Image (spheres, rainbow, N blue to C red):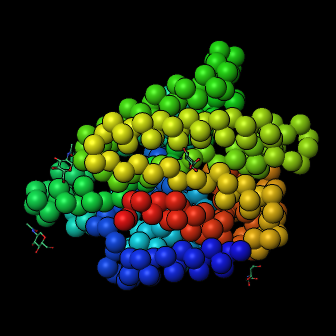
């Protein structure tokens, strides 16, 4: 399964687009959102949502923790490779020098951020509107480095990937009585959807024309959700999965409407719900051994600072685990997700 998906992706790219390493299909890749795609922007923030210490990064280049919430590469790292890039978009806030190194894109994502502004504030993470401010600054630098005309081409031809919403639910709505006592999950989804619309409109106003937005994952299958809301059962929490499916349907319809109302915009909804659900419910068929517990620590609750070198029970080989920590997929799972992203995001490169 793993191999056939890979083969399909590979064949599509080679045959249709003739992708060559070092000659990327698009000039740049810009990334916004939450911890699923953060490559280190939280490292120097006053927040406890961080991952720039072992065992994070133990399977990454040079076994280096970078601030990625993973043992190795993120799905977006694989996407960058699949598009022909030889480097990953750097974490914008981590760069000492900002110049030529932004020509192939940048990463503005921040762990614990969401479409709903207050979520990031709860954790002192970077809200999406602030991420857009950083992107504006980045655009000005690009103009300085390569001139207005080249910069405009980079900006309009680049792919923009957005991953958000999980933190709005798991790190805010479900644990925040000020929200869950006031709004049903459906009503909260509508509020988040309004913030999503504003974000896409603002990104479009800054010149983005090719945007891919990931769906919510099966929230009820995250190890942390099973631990907190699973009433001692070892199964995915159906209530949370239903909320995610409902949200994803709204996301799909809203995105189709945005694409109609904003001319020349390609807005692809990239489904990660189904591929991750498949991995979780049929791990063995997909080459995985463990899909309930995460690799780090007990696998039940550890993420961010709770997943550290003193965590007891951390697994030896994360490539057999769907989840690296209680909130985030392993590199091996990210590889599978990235192949799916590429197939559902074909409209962004054709
Ligand atoms: C714009 O891009 C072209 C082609 O890559 C390059 O030759 C040229 O030097 C760039 N312009 C500036 C001002 O950097
Ligand atoms: C849409 O694309 C066409 C053709 O490239 C261009 O002339 C037009 O100005 C674009 N419209 C907007 C709103 O970007
Ligand atoms: C979005 O809806 C279309 C049909 O309206 C469907 O074909 C597609 O699979 C949906 N995408 C996702 C990610 O749910
Ligand atoms: C880890 O597990 C994978 C998949 O089962 C296997 O291919 C690999 O050889 C293992 N690595 C080590 C170091 O045992």
Q: Position of residue 215 (x, y in %)?
A: 57, 47
On screen, 289 above or below 151?
below
Q: Position of residue 346 (x, y in %)?
A: 45, 63
- Tally of marks: 0
Q: Quadrant of residue 184?
A: top right
Residue that appears at 66% across and 39% down: 244
Residue 130 visible, this angle:
no
Residue that appears at 24% across and 55% down: 155
Q: Quadrant of residue 280?
A: bottom right
Q: Position of residue 17 (x, y in %)?
A: 38, 76
Residue that appears at 53% across and 41% down: 252
The residue positioned farthest toward the top in the image shown: 182
Residue closest to the eye, 147 or 94: 147
On screen, 172 above or below 272?
above
Q: Is residue 348 left or right of residue 246?
A: left
Q: Is residue 26 left or right of residue 69?
A: left
Q: Quadrant of the N terminus?
A: bottom right
Q: Position of residue 77 (x, y in %)?
A: 49, 67
Q: Quadrant of the C terminus?
A: bottom left
Residue 216 visible, this angle:
yes
Q: Quadrant of residue 200?
A: top left
Residue closest to the eye, 303 or 283: 283
On screen, 116 above or below 79?
above
Residue that appears at 34% across and 72% down: 25
């Amino acid at each position: 399964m793993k191999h056939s998906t890979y083969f399909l992706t590979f064949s599509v790219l080679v045959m249709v687009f003739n992708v060559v390493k070092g000659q990327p299909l698009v000039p740049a890749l810009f990334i916004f959102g939450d911890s699923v795609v953060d490559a280190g922007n939280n490292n120097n923030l006053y927040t406890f949502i961080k991952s720039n210490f072992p065992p994070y990064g133990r399977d990454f280049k040079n076994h280096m923790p970078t601030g990625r919430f993973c043992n190795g590469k993120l799905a977006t790292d694989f996407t960058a490779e699949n598009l022909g890039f030889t480097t990953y978009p750097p974490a914008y806030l981590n760069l000492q020098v900002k110049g030529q190194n932004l020509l192939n894109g940048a990463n503005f994502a921040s762990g614990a951020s969401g479409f709903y502004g207050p979520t990031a504030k709860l954790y002192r993470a970077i809200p999406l509107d602030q991420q857009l401010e950083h992107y504006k600054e980045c655009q000005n630098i690009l103009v300085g480095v390569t001139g207005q005309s080249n910069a405009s081409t980079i900006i309009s031809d680049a792919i923009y990937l957005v991953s958000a919403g999980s933190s709005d639910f798991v790190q805010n709505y479900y644990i925040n009585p000020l929200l869950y006592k006031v709004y049903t999950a459906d009503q909260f989804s509508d509020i988040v959807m309004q913030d999503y619309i504003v974000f896409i409109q603002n990104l479009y106003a800054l010149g983005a024309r090719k945007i891919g937005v990931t769906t919510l994952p099966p929230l009820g299958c995250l190890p942390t959700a099973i631990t907190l809301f699973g009433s001692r059962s070892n199964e995915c929490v159906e209530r949370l999965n239903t909320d995610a499916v409902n949200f994803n349907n709204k996301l799909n319809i809203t995105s189709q409407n945005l694409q109609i109302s904003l001319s020349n915009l390609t807005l692809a909804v990239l489904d990660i719900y189904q591929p991750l659900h498949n991995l979780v419910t049929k791990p063995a068929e997909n080459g995985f051994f463990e899909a309930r517990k995460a690799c780090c620590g007990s696998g039940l609750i550890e993420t961010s600072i709770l997943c550290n070198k003193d965590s007891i029970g951390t697994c030896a080989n994360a490539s057999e685990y769907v989840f690296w920590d209680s909130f985030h997929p392993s590199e091996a799972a990210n590889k599978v997700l990235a192949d799916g992203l590429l197939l559902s995001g074909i409209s962004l490169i054709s």
